[in-house]
Image (cartoon, rainbow, N blue to C red):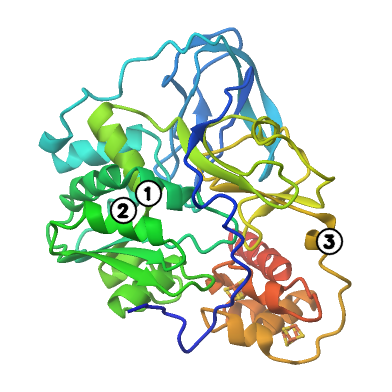
Amino acid sequence: MQFSFMKKQGGSHPEEKKDRTRKIPIVDATIPKVLIFPVSMHIGAPAKPIVEVGDKVKVGQMIAEAGGFISANIYSSVSGEVIAVEKRPSTGGEIDSIIIKNDYEYIKDEPIVEPGKSAHMTDDEIIETVRKAGIVGMGGATFPTAVKLSPPPGMTIDSFIINGAECEPYSTSDNRVMVEYAEEIVSGINLIRKLFPKIKKVYIGIEDNKPNALKSMREATASYRDVIVQPLKTMYPQGSEKGLIKTMTGREVPPGGLPAEVRCVVMNTSTIRACYRACEFGEPLTDRIVSVSGTPIKEAKNLRVKIGTPIDSLIEDCGGFSEVPGKVLSGGPMMGKPISDLGISIIKGTTAITVLTPAEADEGEEKDCIMCSECLNVCPVSLQPILISDAFDRGNLQKAKELGAMDCIECGNCSFICPSKIPLLDNILAAKAAIKEQEAG
Ligand code: SF4
Ligand code: SF4
């Protein structure tokens, strides 16, 4: 039986476009000569560089340390020399970055913990290792995982949800991680669930357009009676955190609330695998899987990429463009960020690079709202996107806030569906930023 939190409200059906990469095994990306590490590749305070120009670094050596409780360490993914610490473009604008020249020797630093001991770690050691490894939500959220694993005292967690929905069109990195590394995901589940002894059920939610991932996760969990591999209806945004919680447990996270408030922890498949590898092998987070696809890409691929690799290197790995692209996105077409500079690098939360033709990227001319209500119908969190957008246009931030702007999960469904091509999400994002700025004083 398929499940979906969006039976009654919201959701859309953008074309899946996953066929080019869903069955393609992961291969190593070329490791470039120069890698770029923005110090802010996570939610929270930027990390602070601890290396200087001229320093020699090893693979897995910390180069920037967390800048606060909500922040994350950053490690070099190659050995070589620091050649600059300067601002560089990234998906979030110009950001302080550490630039490392690869020496192609791949000399490894010491593991962050003694390998082979994860089964005997205490709770504190697991959380500390995840923190030390610089692991953040690798599904794109980039929230520091150690913080997520430390809910406020008094909050009991009884449900553990693994997010394998991967509902963004084109993206197939999580799909391949589930197909190729199911055992490591299960080892990660066993490790993390120890932190929450009251967990009664573990749910692995996977959209039903990923039969191979469903099969491999079912095989890997066959001997666990309390682990449920749940097929989900293919629908966007099936993988939203609050939506998954509702689908799996029937519980609703209150507006502005945390999953822990409804006794749930949700983790992405790649994140949980990274937690296992950090604790079992002492590996900090230095690489990730990225799918590279879209019509103009000559040979679409799933690549194992060193964090810090510029996007143009991945495009080259895929044979380049067969035509001049209309848009290159970090992520998928619904929530991805448009990129104007292919020299920006892959960071911890980059799930996919999606390239659209000019025709696919053409959003058409913006017209007046025809009051069709479609944007309301597709909003998975029951907002009225046009009213929020309108309030922002009129400079009425208070009204935008009252209408729930801050509860928008930024899925992009409203913009996608709007026949008048009104940039609803862009306006709501701008409203959220303005409200945050106003509240900060
Ligand atoms: S982007 Fe926000 S307002 Fe628009 S459909 Fe998604 S959640 Fe609703
Ligand atoms: S979908 Fe577009 S045209 Fe329809 S009500 Fe919303 S903003 Fe207006």
Q: Amino acid at mark 2?
A: Ser
Report the Cα–Cα distance between label 2 and label 3.
Answer: 37 Å
In front here: 175 or 63? Answer: 175
- Inter-mark Cα distance, 1 to 3: 33 Å
Give the percent coordinates (x, y) of residue 213: 37, 56
Q: Is mark 2 within 8 Å of ligand 1?
A: no
Residue type for callout 1: Val
Callout 1–callout 2 Cβ contact below 8 Å = yes
Write down the residue under mark 2.
216
On the image, the x and y values in percent for residue 169 come to: 59, 61
Q: Quadrant of residue 60?
A: top left
**What residue do we see at 45% from left, 86% from top?**
7
The residue at which mark 1 appears reads as 179
Q: Looking at the image, is mark 2 or mark 3 earlier in the sequence?
A: 2
Q: Is residue 152 visible?
A: no
Read off the residue under disc 3.
359
| Quadrant placement of the N terminus | bottom left
Q: Earlier in the sequence, mark 1 or mark 2?
A: 1
- What residue is shown at x 68% (from left), y 90% (from top)? 373
Q: Please report whichever mark, 1 or 3, sits nearer to the chain's N-terminal start.
A: 1
Residue nearest the observer in this picture, 413 or 360: 360
Amino acid, disc 3? Ala
- Foreground disc of the pair 1, 3: 1
